[in-house]
Amino acid sequence: MAKISPRAPRSPAALRARGRLHAAARVAAAPARNRATRASDDEAHAAIHEAILDHRLPPGTKLKEVPLAQIFGITRNVVRKALLRLAHEKLVELRVNRGAIVANPSIEESRHLFAARRAIEGAIADSLSRSATRQQIRELRAVVQQEDAAYRRGEVRAAMKLSIEFHRVLARLAGNTVLAEFVDQLTARTPLVLLAYRAPAQTAGCSNEEHAQIVAAIAGGDGDRAVALMRQHLDDLQGQLQYEEDQGASADLAAIFGRTRD
Ligand SMILES: [Zn+2]
């Protein structure tokens, strides 16, 4: 067997991730050495991806290879692979001779991102208004209810994940896999923009009430209203931002991933 970490992952999320990876490895036909390397790469990728999406790693945070390799008990090569995948997903920026940072989107990029979301998600709302089945409406309502319940329990991080999930479920149910992929990528990049440009001491995010109104318009087959509400919803989200350039950020990587380096 190739080496994985001698240290067991400590967080429940890491344990679940490792459990899934072991299950996947059992059915994989690749040689043992490749399986172990892949597992480490996947684990590092998943952990960094999640930390970026739920705002624990702010835009501009340096992602140094040596501490990350120590935290995950993997080689720098494997860390580099994970960072490369994140760079393809536009969540990480690889800078020549200066290492990787969590992507720090510019004001212009943020405006383009919201313009793209309004166009694509408006089309998705329109299409779903004509095609949604009762079962699909139930699925959408369930996500909105879970999001609402998470906010009521004060679980902001979980609620924000469900907000992203709402937009992804809409895209998936519309049935166009290419549009759904675009939405996946755009929603993954949105939290970075929200974090980079939100007003001080405020959390920026989707309005649960607005999600419910969008579902109601789709359920009623009112395409024009669904499109208008979706566009207004994304306008409101963008309206929470203050476009001033950020100072950049530093962070304790070991604390963020719930691990110690000793
Ligand atoms: Zn939303």
Image (cartoon, helix red, strand yellow):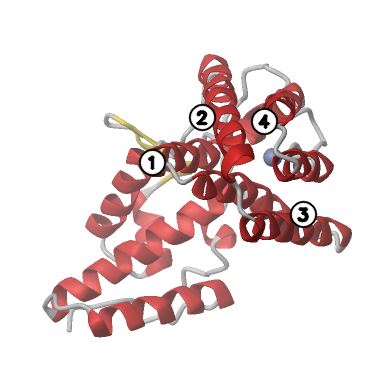
First along the sequence among labels 2 and 3 = 2
Answer whether labels 3 and 4 touch (C-beta < 8 Å): no
Left or right of 254 in this view: 100: left
Tag 4 residue? 223
What amino acid is found at the position of numbered circle 1 in the picture?
Glu
Residue 119 position within the rendered picture, expressed as x and y whole percent measured from the top left? 55, 23
What distance separates the C-alpha of mark 1 from that of mark 2? Answer: 13 Å
Depth-wise, is mark 2 or mark 3 nearer the camera?
3
Up-down relation of residue 217 to residue 156 (above or below) = above
Q: For the residue carrying disc 3, how many other residues have a C-alpha within 10 Å: few (<14), some (14-19), or many (20+)? A: some
Tag 1 residue? 89
What amino acid is found at the position of numbered circle 2 in the picture?
Asn
Q: What residue sits 45% from the left and 42% below the top?
A: 180
Quadrant of residue 7 in the image?
bottom left
Tag 3 residue? 156
First along the sequence among labels 4 and 2 = 2
What distance separates the C-alpha of mark 4 from that of mark 2? Answer: 35 Å
What amino acid is found at the position of numbered circle 4 in the picture?
Gly
Q: Does the numbered disc 3 mark a residue whose Cβ is under 8 Å from ligand 1?
A: no
What distance separates the C-alpha of mark 3 from that of mark 1? Answer: 24 Å
First along the sequence among labels 4 and 1 = 1
Q: Is residue 249 visible?
A: no
Residue 135 position within the rendered picture, expressed as x and y whole percent measured from the top left? 63, 61
